[in-house]
Amino acid sequence: MDSVAALGAMPVAADGARTPRHTNPANAGAVMSLMDCYLLGLQPNAETCPYRTTSNADRLVVEGDGVSTIGAEAISWQYYDVFTLPAWQWVLHKAIAGYKAVSGGRPGGVAPAPSAA
């Protein structure tokens, strides 16, 4: 199944994101022993819930454009951009227009943003 079909087949999370996991065809586990791979798909103007992870993560934009807020810094991205998310920083991704996909996602070890009290 190609990535676009995998995105379409995934259930939509509460924040509107779809996050299929790419797996190793030999064992259905992580693509490499120390690397996991997810695809994050967002509808136009959708944004993820803020999250953070215990690991660093690299992002490769495979379609569209948007903005990611990493800690207190917002960065704009577009097709073919690559950027890194440092461990334990709050992150939020927002698609600007069209069906957007950012490789990565929310693998295990993710801490969701605290709810507003």
Image: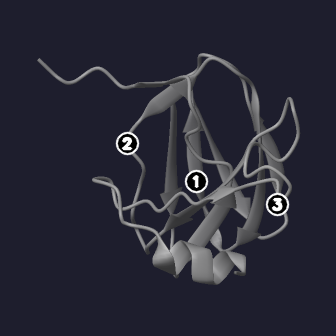
Identify residue type, mark 2: Cys
In the rendered structure, are the residues bearing label 2 and label 1 in contact, judged by CB atoms less than 8 Å apart?
no
Local crowd size for mark 2, using a 10 Å CA cut-off: few (<14), some (14–19), many (≥20): some
* Foreground pick, 55 / 22: 22
Q: Quadrant of residue 1?
A: bottom right
Residue 103 seen from this side: yes
**Dot 1 amino acid type:** Val
Q: Circle 3 sits in a helix, a strand or a loop, which is it?
A: loop
Quarter of the picture holding the C terminus: top left
- Give the residue at mark 2: 49
Label 1 crowd (10 A; few <14 / some 14-19 / many >=20): some
Label 2 to label 1, Cα distance in Å? 13 Å
The residue under label 3 is: 25
Can I make out residue 90 in this image?
A: no
In the structure shown, which secondary structural element does the residue marked by tag 1 occupy? Answer: strand
Residue bearing mark 1 = 67
